[in-house]
Amino acid sequence: MSARENTLGRIRSALGKNASRTERGEINAYISQHLAGPRPQAEWNLAARFRERALSLASSVDQIASVSEMPQAVARYLRENNLPLQAVCWPEFAQHDWAAQGMIVTAQPANGSDLVGITGAFCAIAETGTLVLFSGRDTPPATSLLPETHVAVVRTSRIVKNMEEAWGLLRKEYPVMPRAVNFVSGPSRTADIEQTVTLGAHGPYRVHIVLVG
C-alpha cells in the first residue's frame, strides 16, 4: 500500500466509510461526465463581449485582420506607451519580421530582466474577459508572468462563452491535462494595503490583447 492509499484509508476509517469498487466506479463515472450546472443566457457577440469585459479589467485591446499585421500592432502599442522595443515571445511568433518594426524579439522564456513578453492564448472567455494559457514546452508561463508588460495575441475564433466551455475545449483538444492552467483577467493587482488597488503587485503592470480576425 502506498503512503497515499494508507492516508486515505485511515481517513475513510475515521469517517466510518469504506467505499467499494462499485461505489468508486460510480464516482469516477460521474466525475468523467463533467456535468455543468445551470448557466445564464449568453447571447452576446463573443468578440464584442470579450473586448468589453477585458477593458473593464484594465487590459487594453487592439484588433487586426490577420496575424501578419501583429508585429506592426505590437510595435505601435509599445511606442505609444514609451515601452521598450525589445521582448521575448513564444516560439510560434519567432518567424515574424520583428526587425522591420524596429524590434528585437527572442523566442525564449522570460527571466527577471525581460520587460515585455509576447504570448498567444489557448482561448479567451467572453463572459469575464479572461485569457486562458497553459504551461508547456512551447508555451512557457514565465513569458506572461514575469515581464512588466504582457502582450497576448488571441484569435477571435478561440473566444468561448464561459469558463465551462473553456474547460470543455481543453478536455477535447488535450486528453492529458497540462501541468498548469493559468487564467489571466487583466493586469496583476492587489488591495491588501489600505484597500487601495495597486497594479503589478504579483505580475505584469499591463496586459495588452491583440485580437486577430
Image (cartoon, rainbow, N blue to C red):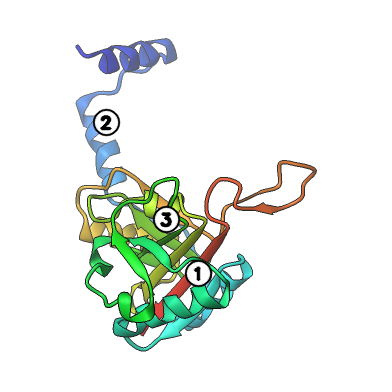
First reached walking from the N terminus: tag 2 or tag 1 = 2
Amino acid type at mark 1 = His
**Rendered residue at 47%/54% (across/down):** 147
First reached walking from the N terminus: tag 3 or tag 1 = 3
Residue for badge 2: 23
Residue sitting nearer the eye, 109 or 41:
109
Relative vertical location of residue 192 with respect to residue 60 in this rendering, above or below: above
Residue for badge 3: 144
Please state if 10 lies on the left or on the right of 195 as rendered.
left
Q: Is residue 43 visible?
A: no
Residue 51 - label: none
Determine whether the residue tagged by mark 1 lies in a helix, strand or loop.
Answer: strand
Amino acid type at mark 3 = Ser
Residue sitting nearer the eye, 66 or 129:
66
> Where residue 137 appears, x then y in whole percent?
22, 50
**Rendered residue at 46%/61% (across/down):** 150
> Where residue 43 appears, x then y in whole percent?
49, 80
Within 10 angstroms of label 2, few (less than 14), some, or many (20 or more) residues? Answer: few
Quadrant into which the C terminus falls = bottom left
Quadrant into which the N terminus falls = top left
Residue for badge 1: 208
Q: CA distance from mark 3 to mark 1?
A: 11 Å
Within 10 angstroms of label 1, few (less than 14), some, or many (20 or more) residues? Answer: many
Amino acid type at mark 2 = Glu
The quadrant where residue 2 appears: top left
**Rendered residue at 25%/43% (across/down):** 29
> Where residue 135 appears, x then y in whole percent?
31, 49
Q: CA distance from mark 2 to mark 3?
A: 42 Å
**Rendered residue at 51%/82% (across/down):** 48
Relative vertical location of residue 36 with respect to residue 101 in this rendering, above or below: above
Determine whether the residue tagged by mark 3 lies in a helix, strand or loop.
Answer: helix
Q: CA distance from mark 2 to mark 1?
A: 48 Å
